[in-house]
Amino acid sequence: MKAWSIKKPGGRDVLQQIDVLKPVPKQGELLIEVKAAGINRTDTLTRQNETLAASYPILGVEISGVVVENQSTDPKLNAGTRVCGLVNHGGYGEYAIMPADRAMILPDELSFSEGAAIPEVFLTAYQTIYWLGELDKKEKILIHAAGSGVGTAAIQLARQLSQANIFATAGKTEKLNMARTLGANVTVNYKEESFSERVNTVTDGTGVDVILDFVGASYWEMNMASCAVDARWILIGTLGGSEVANVSLNHLMKKRIALKATLLTPRSDEYKARLSQEFAEMAMPLFQEKKLKPVIHKVLPFAELKEAHRIIENDENIGKIILKVSE
C-alpha cells in the first residue's frame, strides 16, 4: 500500500511517499480502508522531532474510512461499517489500524472528508471544555485561535451543549466572521485590541469562567486579567512561547484560578477510548441533526501532503485540512 513517512526529521522536504505492506490487525483492533485523513499540528511536530529514530512512522493520527476486518467482539463494527477516529500513527496510508474501542460510527449524512475532520479537533475541544474546564450551562468561555480546527469545534460545542456566552479571538477578519457564524457572541481581533479589556468591558469586570488557551506565555497577563473568580484556565498549546517571567502566584490564589495543561495525542489508549465513547454518545447525534458541523478549509489529493503541511504551518486555514486518500 502507499503511505507517507519521512526520510529523517526536518522540514516539509523530508516527507516521502513509500510502499509498505498492509498492516494486520490484532485482537481488539480494526483494519480500516482509509478514505480521508485529517492534517494536524501534531503531525508537523512529529515530522520535525529530532528524537525520532529510524525506522520512521507513517504519519497521521485521525482518519475516516471503511472497516475491512474486525478483530473485536463488537458486531456494530463488522466489515463495511463507515467509521472515523484516532489512530496511533498510520493515518497517512491507504490502510490503517484503529483500536476498536476508539472507532466512532460515521453517520451516512456525513462524507468521509467530513468524518476525517471530526476526531482530533472535536475530541480535543470536548476534553478541554468539559473534562478539564467543566463548563456549565450559560457560563462564559474565552476561546483563542478561533479559526483553528480545535477553535471552530470548541465554539460549536460550547454553544450547542452549554448555551455558553462565547468570547473568541483571532487575527484575521475572515476567522472572526466564521467564529460569529458558529456561535461566538463576542469576537476580538488580537492584532487590533486587547482581548482582556474587551472581556472586562462586556462582563462588567467579572471575567470569564473558562479559558481555552493555545497561546501560552505571550497571553499570560491578559488571560490572568480575563479570569473570573474560580475560573478554569486550560492550556493546550504554546504558540506564543512556553516561558513566563515574573509569575505572581498570588494572582492565581486571589481568584482561585485552576490552571490545567493537557495534550491529547500522548494520552493512553484507555483515555482516548473513554473520550471517544463519551463524545460519540453526547455529540455525534448533533452532526446528524446539523447542529454541529466539521469546518473544512480544503481537501487535497493524497499526493499533495507537502502542500497540506505548508498551509497548516503558515496558519492559512480556517478549520481543517483534509487529505483525500481514496474514493
Image (tube, helix red, strand yellow):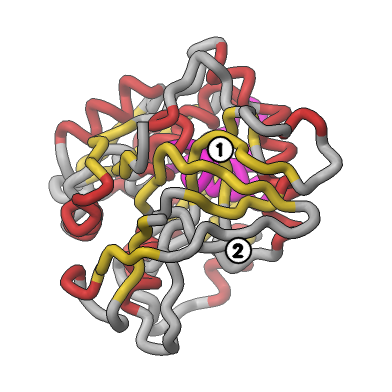
At 53% from the left and 68% from the top, the residue drawn is 251
Question: Which kind of residue does numbered mark 2 sit on?
Answer: Lys
> Residue 169: horizontal and vertical position, in percent?
30, 43
- The residue wearing badge 2 is 260
Identify the image quadrant of the N terminus. bottom left
* Direction from residue 271 to residue 14 in the image, left or right: left
Q: Residue at x 29, y 40 (%)?
A: 147
Q: Is residue 128 magenta?
A: yes
Tags 2 and 1 touching, CB below 8 Å: no
The amino acid type found where label 1 is placed reads Cys
From the viewer's perspective, is residue 107 above or below residue 326? above
Instruction: Tell me the quarter of the picture where residue 16 sits.
Output: bottom left
Residue 236: percent from left, percent from top: 48, 60
- Res. 209 in view: no
Q: Nearer the viewer, residue 175 or 111?
A: 111
Marks 2, 1: nearer the viewer: 1
Q: Which residue is outermost to the top?
A: 289
Task: Count residues near mark 1 (Cα–Cα under 10 Å), then give few for <14, some for 14-19, many for 20+.
Answer: many
Residue 168 placement: quadrant: top left
From the viewer's perspective, is 77 left or right of 97? right
Q: In the rendered view, tell whether residue 291 sits above or below residue 141.
A: above
| Local SS, label 1 | strand
Pick the residue in front: 122 or 33. 33
Question: Which residue shows up at 39% across the image and 35% down it?
Answer: 152
Q: Tell me the SS state at disc 2.
A: strand
Please say whether residue 84 is one of the residues in the magenta stretch.
no
Residue annotated with mark 1: 84
Point out residue 261 in the picture as x, y percentages from the top left corner.
56, 65
Residue 61 placed where, x, y %? 49, 56
Magenta span covers which residues?
Answer: 117-143
Compared across the picture, whether 148 is left or right of 255 comes to left
